[in-house]
Amino acid sequence: MTSSLTTDPVAPATTQADYMGFVGVTTASSSIMKVFPLWADILGLPTRTLIGHDLPMDADPAQYRAMVEQIRDDPHHRGALVTTHKMNVYAAASDLFDELDPFAVSCAEISSISKRGPLLSGRAKDPITVDLALNDFLPADHFARTGAEVVILGAGGSGTALSWALAERADAPARITVTARSQDKLDHLREVHRQHGTREGLIDYVVTETPEDADAVVAAAPAGSVIANATGLGKDRPGSPLTDAVVFPEGAYAWEFNYRGSLEFLHQARAQAAEQPLHVVDGWRYFIHGWSQVVADVFELDLTPDVVEQLAEAAESVR
């Protein structure tokens, strides 16, 4: 079974020209379809064409393997960014890759598929990109200065990456709480941290079976804490991990990882920001860093901060 394709209108997929792929659920509605040609011009890429590989959230392993094989075997397919399906691609098809980076192996996810000559490479770029996005809005000494903590709602690929990046920071929080609806996801994350050598006691793993349970975890966090929605709710599926009755800590940073979709978590945070001091951050800069890092990986580029800002400025025109 092959994945469905959503083709950017700039150039048809039937032409024998190189292109890059985007593995997701509803790729056609992503801003990157308009942004990628602009970035291609800025970076001097060999293609302005981006195609979407749309897979359902409950795709079976055979679909993931077929998609990876399609990328591997097509000489015109330069590589792909993977979103939503990062952990499933690793679980179903990691053996198809000739090389995997340490992040991909430790986090059991693949967010960047690239080719190095005859070799198919899989990398997990999220621990890097999530840290870049965090540094865009959080003061470098925030945790040491305030004693704030972090609550990560969701133990999937993005939540794993954020917990990894936070544990590596010079200014690491005193405590990181990661929530999930089921124990198995937390057990997997705990094993990732154990293998990585993350400091004992830094991370609490909390099952929140209901949004009310998650509300209680958020409300218990100290002032200035970072509350991140890494569940995917509000993007590929409607909803929020929290109820409308949630109380964010005073001065908290409410970080919605998504920039498109129904974005219920973002709306909940903005409603409270009108009543108390609260920093509300959407997923736009995470989107910029995530895509620019994978494009650089696929086309073997080195990106300076100045170039990233050029890309961000270009992307803003289609936001």
Image: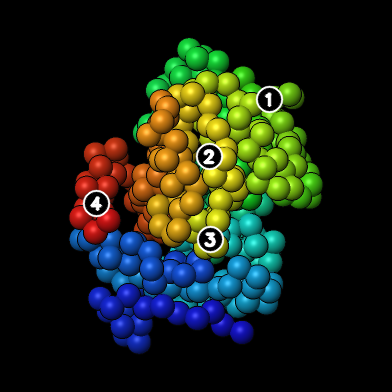
Task: Report if residue 307 is visible in the image.
Answer: no
* Label 3 element class: loop
User: In the figure, 180 relative to 148: above or below?
Assistant: below
Question: Which residue in the protein does label 2 denote?
Answer: 228
Question: Which residue in the protein does label 4 denote?
Answer: 316
Mark 3 and mark 2 lie on one chain; the one further toward the N terminus is 2
Classed neighbour count for the residue bearing mark 2: other residues with Cα under 10 Å, few (<14), some (14–19), many (≥20):
many
Left or right: 245 in relation to 16: right
Q: Position of residue 313 (x, y in %)?
A: 22, 48
Q: Which mark is residue 202?
A: 1
Callout 2–callout 4 Cβ contact below 8 Å: no
**For residue 87, which quarter of the picture?**
bottom right
* Label 2 element class: strand
Question: Which residue in the protein does label 3 denote?
Answer: 238
Task: Say which amino acid is labelled 3.
Answer: Pro
Left or right: 157 in relation to 251: right
